[in-house]
Amino acid sequence: GGTKVSIEGSYQAEGLDPVLERTLKGWLLACWKKGYDVTNRQIKNCALSITSDPDFKASKGWLAKFINRCRKEYDSES
């Protein structure tokens, strides 16, 4: 056997636009820490305003995975 490497998760996603990932995650975690409710639409709109990639659509699948990654980080910090 060898070592299994997951292609899902943060490696693949962060590679798409690391600036977007870092900036958006920082904003979202700050909002959650202050107790703000942030809607999926707000996250999507913020992502679209940050990215410089004209092909980036902030799809439902991307959004779900992004929120998941942020929740894991948030839970590990709190």
Image: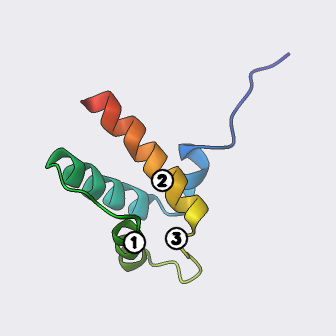
- Mark 1–mark 3 Cα distance, whole angstroms, equals 10 Å
Label 2, secondary structure: give it.
helix
Say what secondary structure mark 3 lies in.
loop
User: Neighbour class for label 1 at 10 Å: few (<14), some, many (≥20)?
Assistant: few
Q: Position of residue 64 (x, y in %)?
A: 52, 55
Dots 1 and 3: beta carbons under 8 Å? no
Q: Is residue 15 above or below residue 6?
A: below
Whole-percent x and y of residue 17? 49, 63
Dot placed on the residue nearer the N-terminal end, 1 or 2: 1
- The residue sitting at the left extreme is 34
The answer to whether residue 19 is left or right of residue 27 is: right
Specify the amino acid type for callout 1: Arg
Q: Residue shown at 40%/65% (left/top)?
A: 40
Q: Secondary structure at mark 1?
A: helix
| Residue 18: percent from left, percent from top | 45, 58
Residue 64 visible = yes
| Badge number at residue 41 | 1
Q: Is residue 9 left or right of residue 71?
A: right
Front in this rendered view, residue 19 or 76: 76
Q: How far is mark 1 from mark 2, CA to CA?
A: 13 Å
Q: CB of mark 3 within 8 Å of CB of mark 2?
A: no
Q: Which residue is mark 2?
A: 66
Q: Is residue 73 positioned above or below 41 on the image?
A: above
Residue at the spot of label 3: 58
CA neighbours of label 3 inside 10 A, class few (<14), some (14 to 19), many (20+): some
**Circle 2: is it few (<14), some (14-19), or many (20+) Cα within 10 Å?**
many
Q: Residue at x 55, y 75 (%)?
A: 56
Q: Quadrant of residue 6?
A: top right
The residue lying at 74 percent from left, 26 percent from top is 4
